[in-house]
Image (spheres, grey):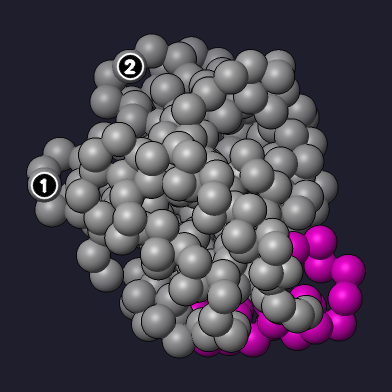
Amino acid sequence: MRGAERSGMGGFSDVLGALLESQLSGGAAEKLKRGLQGGGLERMLSQALGDGGSGALGGLLGGSGGAAGMLGQLLGGSGGRAGAGGLEALAGRLLGGGSASPRDLGGGLMSLLGGLAMAAMTQGGRRPARAPLGLRAPETPDEEAELESAAQVVLMAMINAAKADGRIDPQEAERIVGQLDRQGADPEVRDFVFREMAGPLDTGPMVAAARGNPELALQVYAASLLAVEVDTAAENRYLDELQRALELPPQAVEQIERSIKA
């Protein structure tokens, strides 16, 4: 998948932030807020970091100091921690009511999803050689394109999940697209979002992009879980089918579900 060129509010990471602000994903913001305030997100990432930053995730990020949850480790210092600015903006917006740009919010969400995927894989005994993009800065143009493509797939995941028990309300779709226009979204990205929201549920392209990439597949599942309340049979069925289609290990799925629902 190709990401759009970034000019102004150009890319899919920016749109993710705008959608998070607009509450397309229902209770996503509230789930993130609970998780960051001593909930499952913080616990899961803290376990992967380990005391003193000596855990797998902490080592890959070059961490130092105590692991007082995700924020204490991932937000401190620079040292190539690409997610620091975005995570700080996301946490500030959710926990402190501060302001943040869509780009920072979207980058923070990608960092958080990357951390969840990393933690789930590490706890399942499948430690990746490097931290996922989003948690670390892209080092080449190819990695920049890869991160933008991942944000596009995550965006598709959240939109498709929102359709799990029906369509997205057309008026809601028009309102969100109008918001993207006001914020100067790239026309190509804006049109993609409108097509995704207006069309029928179709997980094929999303699954094809994520299959064979365990980190991205787990990010897709986590983003889907954020996007729905999981209080209907249709939503539960959708998530079960998505897990099978992405060929996700049950243990990793259970860990992500526990972290987001807690």
Give the percent coordinates (x, y) of residue 156: 49, 67
Marks 2 and 1 in Cβ contact (< 8 Å): no
Residue at x 27%, y 70% (from the top left corner): 1
- Neighbor class of circle 2 (other Cα within 10 Å; few <14, some 14-19, many 20+) is some
Identify the secondary structure beneath mark 1.
helix
Give the percent coordinates (x, y) of residue 157: 54, 67
Q: How many marks?
A: 2
Q: Quadrant of residue 224?
A: bottom right
Task: Identify residue type, mark 2.
Answer: Ser
Q: Nearer the viewer, residue 68 or 9?
A: 9
Question: In the displayed structure, would residue 150 be above or below residue 16?
Answer: below
Q: Which residue is mark 1?
A: 141
Dominant secondary structure (helix, strand or loop) of the stretch shown in magenta: helix
Q: Which residue is mark 2?
A: 78
Q: Is residue 176 visible?
A: yes
Marks 2 and 1 sit apart, C-alpha to C-alpha, by: 21 Å
Residue at x 32%, y 50% (from the top left corner): 186
Residue at x 75%, y 80% (from the top left corner): 166
Dot label at residue 202: none
- Neighbor class of circle 1 (other Cα within 10 Å; few <14, some 14-19, many 20+) is few
Q: Quadrant of residue 79?
A: top left
Q: Is residue 198 left or right of residue 239?
A: left
| Sequence-wise first label, 2 or 1 | 2
Is residue 232 found inside the magenta-colored segment of the image? yes
Q: Nearer the viewer, residue 6 or 157?
A: 6
Residue at x 38%, y 52% (from the top left corner): 12
Q: Is residue 211 visible?
A: no
Q: Bounds of the magenta span?
A: 228-248
